Image (cartoon, helix red, strand yellow):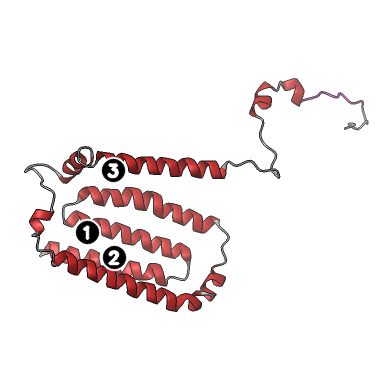
Amino acid sequence: MIQTFVFYLFASIVIASGVMTIAARNPVHSVLWLILAFFNAAGLFLIIGAEFLAFLLIIVYVGAVAVLFLFVVMMLDVDFAQLRSKMAAYLPLGLLLAFILLIEIGAAIFAWAAGGIRLSSRAAPIEQGTSNIEALGNLLYTRYVFIFEAAGIVLLVAMVGAIVLTHRTRSDVRPQNVGSQVRRRPEDAVVNMQPGVGQGVEL
């Protein structure tokens, strides 16, 4: 009874916060509603016993992705009023894409249910007394180890590419010469002029 009540509580908050993420006029408020949706989705994962996915959702999505969205929205000077003015022009295309996506999801669910394979045979075998974190780790580093390493390589290449793009050489910016700054002596930076009484300093 309590588990059912908690499930409907978390599920209703997830749906409401998802709607508010889209409907909020302030982009900062949209990110905050998104963070609330992530927290309640993590609660749903805890109910079904997937604590690893719950912690992953909080640490990665709330702690990194959503906070990054929040900083980007707050730091960039984006004219959201101008963006909303063009929303009506793209509304028919958006509704068409949403309808196509809904049809694809329905077709996937129908094909999955009509496959003739029982649900128990589709699930990965888990030994008794093994937590889902341990089972997921054993599966990732044995059966899917090459796919897991390939995903890591893709993320590494993306990170290196982002660093290269942000550290490109610009002609309108004076570069920093770290070597000359380290070799600089105090007498090179400070000069004692000792001017006379009533005499100004000549630059």
> What is the three-letter code of the residue carrying label 1?
Leu
Q: Nearer the viewer, residue 129 or 14?
A: 129
> What is the three-letter code of the residue carrying label 2?
Val
Spatial CA span between label 1 and label 3: 28 Å
**Which mark sits nearer the N-terminus, 3 or 2?**
2
Label 2 Cα crowd, 10 Å radius (few <14 / some 14-19 / many 20+):
many
Label 1 Cα crowd, 10 Å radius (few <14 / some 14-19 / many 20+):
many
> Where are the magenta residues, as a range?
190-196
Q: Position of residue 50 (x, y in %)?
A: 19, 51
Circle 2/circle 1 CB separation < 8 Å? yes
Which residue is rendered at x = 51% and y = 73% of the image?
84
Which residue is rendered at x = 77% and y = 25% of the image?
190
**Which mark sits nearer the N-terminus, 1 or 3?**
1
**Label at residue 14:** 2
The verdict on residue 113 being magenta is no
Label 3 Cα crowd, 10 Å radius (few <14 / some 14-19 / many 20+):
few
Compared with 115, 180 (above or below) is above
Circle 1/circle 3 CB separation < 8 Å? no
Residue underneath mark 3: 147
**Label at residue 44:** 1
Q: Please name which of the two marks, 3 or 2, marks the residue nearer to the observer.
A: 3
Which residue is rendered at x = 38% and y = 72% of the image?
97
Q: Secondary structure at mark 2?
A: helix
**Which mark sits nearer the N-terminus, 2 or 1?**
2
